Image (cartoon, grey):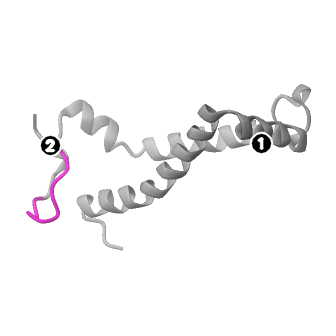
Amino acid sequence: STGVRSSEEDGVVVYKSDLVPTEALVSESRVLGPLLSTVGVSSVVWGLVARPEFGDFAERSASLAELLSADRVGSSFVVDLALFALFQGWLVDDDLKRRGVEE
């Protein structure tokens, strides 16, 4: 299998033309960032204001805190989310270097 990511030590630059066409179409699309941002913002808005029949934000927050304090699976998802957020900053910087974007 051919790797897409180059090692920083060997100094190899990977160009869009080096990617499989389907992979290049998806991963290099300018629509991908705004699309995923829209999904994220919509999720946060949905979590804050949707489904009022389950109570207001304070009541739902208290219910979530109670659930996470007793549910090990739910707590592990929160830990996974925090780890993902930490690594995402590193991965984005690495991808920008791969694409040749200067800071």
Circle 2 sits on which residue? 3
Q: Quadrant of the C terminus?
A: bottom left
Q: Is residue 60 visible?
A: yes
Q: Position of residue 99 (x, y in %)?
A: 26, 58
| Residue extending furthest toward the top | 53
Majority secondary structure in the magenta region: loop
Amino acid carrying mark 1 in the image: Ala
- Name above or below for residue 48 compared with residue 8: above
Task: Please report the bounds of the magenta region as a residue range.
Answer: 3-12
Vertical side of 21 occupied by 97: above or below? below
What residue is drawn where x is 59% and y is 32%?
A: 73
Q: Position of residue 67 (x, y in %)?
A: 75, 34
Name the amino acid type tagged 2: Gly
Q: Nearer the viewer, residue 65 or 69?
A: 69
**Viewer-nearest residue: 74 or 101:** 74
Q: Is residue 67 above or below residue 9?
A: above
Give me the residue at 17% from left, 40% from top.
19
Judging from the image, what secondary structure is the residue with disc 1 in? helix
**Side of 52 relative to 43 (left or right):** right
Q: Position of residue 84 (x, y in %)?
A: 47, 49
Badge 1 density bin: few <14, some 14–19, many ≥20, Cα 10 Å: few
Quadrant in which residue 96 is drawn:
bottom left
Specify the label residue 65 is tagged with.
Answer: 1
Residue depicted at 49% across the width and 51% down the height: 83
Whether residue 31 is visible to the viewer of this picture, yes or no, is no
